[in-house]
Each structure stands twice: as structure tokens, then as C-alpha cells.
Amino acid sequence: VFFWSLGSFLVWRGLQTVKKVEKIFSILVIGLITILSVYLLRHFQPEVVPYYNLSKMFLPYGVILFALHASPAIAEAHALLPGSQRHFRRAVILGTLIPIAVYMLFALAAVGAGGLSVTEVATVGLGQKFGDGVALLGNLFAIFAMGTGFFGFGVALKQTFVWDHKLSPWFSQFLVISIPLALFLLGLRSFIGILDLVGGLFIGVEAIIVALVFWRARQRGDLDASRYTLPHVWLLLAPVLLVFTLATVFSIIKLIN
């Protein structure tokens, strides 16, 4: 509730405040996860590297997609850099590659150090195995990482309600901050389960829609398509649509089961 209260206050303050806080939180997240990963790599177990289970290949799909989801951040970056396409393009590319690299480093370190006994929330099991110092760093990382997500998604959702659905700023704010708290109080507290559902189903569908909107906008949009050049677009769109469609269907089947 304390975390929710602080996050809600920052969402209420708006994009300019969130921009400053997220910059600090992002630096802390990258710093903490790098320190933690370097420490864990000292305890790396080479015997876990050959392990694989093809039947579980799509198991982490929803969680990974949630972790890499950043379409609201792209809209925010464009709002903050309206007059510079070059800086906007660079921000999108770096903002995509840096989290991927950091996630891969931490995943390798966590699984390598924890082995097959790594827990659903990795920082919990690692703290139990390596002591209070790792637990403290892991939980600080989790707090700052969840904070950047809460602030960014909260502001983006509030702006969507105001700009696209023409709701009042006050009512938009109320919807953004009240629904998460209500769901939590009603008992929806499975951390990985929620990420898997949101990522695999809703973000998967969103990715499909974004790809289709991009294709349609190049044909009938009101902006010059040359501003957003992407040669051989179908070589990218076709596999993207196929992968996300199959994975979303898999997520729906998993949810029903």
C-alpha cells in the first residue's frame, strides 16, 4: 500500500515529474542488477548450461513479453522529443537494447548460480541461498524496477483516457490508481501469474494490432510514409504477426487449462 501510495502520487504529478524520477530509478536498476549479476557469476555452475526442456519452451513467453513491453514509453519519448527524429530514433533503439542486455545478464547469472532450484521470483531464492546482502540488493532492484513500470504505465494510461477517450483528468487519475489497489485487495497477488497473463494475452494482442496499424498507416496515414522508412516491411511484419499470433493462442489455451 505504501508503494501504491507513492506511485499514485507521482502519476498524479504527471509526465515531467515521472521523467525525472524514472531517470534516477533506471540508473539504480541497472546499477543494482549489474552488481548482483557480477556477484552471482562468481558462483556460476557450468553443469546447468546444457539443461533444456522443449516442452517448457513457451512457459516464460508472457513474462518476457511483459518485461520487454515498452509501447507507452515510445509515445512518451516522442512527446518529450517532438522536434528531433534523430534523437527519438536513438532513444528507441538504445531504450530497447539496454534492457535486453541487462535481462540476459541477470537471467544467466541467476540460473547459473541458483541452478534448477531457482525460485519463481529469482531474488527470493537467491537471497535464501546467498544471504541477506543478496536479498537486500534483489529486493531493492525489484522495488525500483516495479516503480519505473508503475510510473510509466500509469502516466501513459492516464493520458490515453484523457486524449483518446476524452475523460476528465480527475476521473482518469481515479481509474488508473484505484483498479490496481482494488485487484490487490480482492486477492489477485500471484506476481508471475499476473505478468504471464498480461504479457501473453493482452500485450501479445497489442503487438499484433500495432504491427497491423503500422502497415495500414503506411498506406493511408496522414503523414508522409518516408518519415518512418522501413524497407522490405513484410519481411519483418510477417514473422512478427506469425510469432505473436501463435504465442497468444498458446497463452489463451494455457489460461483455459
Image: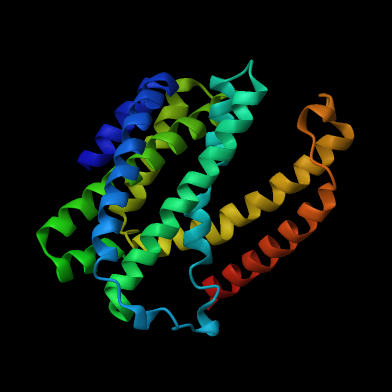
Is residue 11 depicted above or below 251 in this figure? above
Q: Nearer the viewer, residue 214 or 106?
A: 106
Left-right relation of 134 to 206: left
Q: Extreme right residue here?
A: 219
Q: Nearer the viewer, residue 139 or 203?
A: 139
Left-right relation of 17 to 210: left
Q: Percent x, y for residue 124?
A: 22, 64
The residue shown at (42%, 51%) is 102
Quarter residue 87 falls in = top right
Q: Nearer the viewer, residue 145 or 193?
A: 145
Q: Is residue 118 visible?
A: no
Count of marks, rendered view: 0
Is residue 116 depicted above or below 133 in this figure? below
Q: Percent x, y for residue 222?
A: 83, 24
The residue shown at (30%, 59%) is 187
Q: Extreme top residue here?
A: 83
Q: Percent x, y for residue 112?
A: 33, 72
Left-right relation of 1 to 197: left
Q: Is residue 41 visible?
A: yes
Is residue 20 depicted above or below 151 in this figure? above
The residue shown at (15%, 67%) is 130
Q: Percent x, y for residue 33?
A: 31, 51
Quarter the N terminus occupies: top left
The residue shown at (54%, 84%) is 55
Quarter residue 120 falls in = bottom left
Q: Extreme left residue here?
A: 132
Is residue 213 depicted above or below 117 in this figure? above
Q: Nearer the viewer, residue 213 or 43?
A: 43
Colour scheme employed for the rendering of this structure: rainbow
